Amino acid sequence: MKTPVYFISDIHLKLNVDNAEQLRREKLFRLLDKICKTGGTCFFVGDLFDFYFEYPDVIPKAYSDFYNKALEMKTKGVNLHFQTGNHDYWFQDFLDKKIMDKIYTEDLDIMIAGKKFFITHGDGLLSWDHGYRILKKIIRSKFFINLFRWIHPTIAYKIARFVSRSGKEETHQADYYNDVKIELQSFAKKQFENGFDFMISGHYHLGEMYNINQGKLAVLGDWFYRPSYAKFDGKDLSFQLWESDV
Ligand SMILES: [Mn+2]
């Protein structure tokens, strides 16, 4: 994988492009332009889209500016890697062949410039996520996807908007975030004991990096409250908040 590698996750590009969404995208595109200047790899660690469902002949049009930006990055020599999250694993050949250079649907164990990385979107990782892990198997099954594909796109996207809206209500107590932090850190500690140097996770929207023994765990931030990214320069991993004025 070409270095430097930039890790970004949980952008949740929306289906409804209002003013706030437009500003969020401009902020993201400013970072993507910056990445074009250094080259390397831009690695999206899941939930790039709030909802993505591709049909053999139909793609979601709400993301057309992102497709353009992605193609521009590729022509400037940036490689685009994408690990699917829980909001955007229903891709087909448009995302796979035209937009991204590489797509991963599973957790990734990879060497980059001599360092061992564990890269995961992170959904289903927590020890108490039993029910979710079963649901994840069902909604990612070929059977479920083929069934959903026969719903007219207008209706399918109406369902998606509804599910996405109802998901917004989900806010957690500080205790929850603390439990998540502890759980992720103990998971990472085991990975580091098993020879990994770095672990990258999205999904939990923490936007923080932790030093654990000799390893580093980056839990990336979402692009609503804590726009951020991690950067591997070929030697070390650093974490950056991406403020609006940068
Ligand atoms: Mn997620």
Image (tube, rainbow, N blue to C red):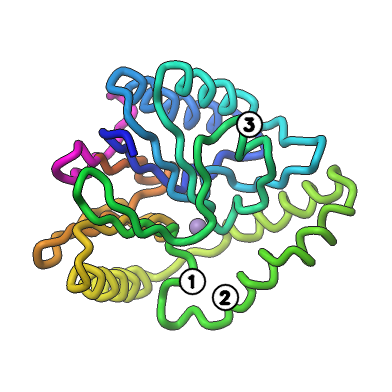
Q: Circle 1 sits in a helix, a strand or a loop, which is it?
A: loop
N-term-proximal mark, 2 vs 3: 3
Q: Does residue 159 lie above or below 193 as drawn? A: above
Write down the quadrant of residue 117 in the picture.
bottom left
Q: Does residue 240 lie above or below 116 as drawn? A: above
From the top left corner, tell me how far across and down residue 58 is, in percent. 79, 36
Which SS type dominates the magenta stretch? Answer: loop
Q: Write down the region rendered in magenta.
A: 232-246
Query: Which residue lies under the disc numbered 2?
Result: 132
Q: Is residue 26 left or right of residue 184?
A: right
N-term-proximal mark, 2 vs 1: 1
Query: Which residue lies under the disc numbered 1?
Result: 124
Other-residue count near label 2 (Cα within 10 Å), few / some / many at <14 / 14–19 / ≥20: some
Q: Is residue 239 magenta?
A: yes
Query: Which residue lies under the disc numbered 3?
Result: 63
The residue positioned 49% from the left and 78% from the top of the image is 129
From the top left corner, tell me how far across and down residue 75 is, in percent. 47, 17
N-term-proximal mark, 3 vs 1: 3
Residues marked 3 and 1 touching at CB (< 8 Å): no
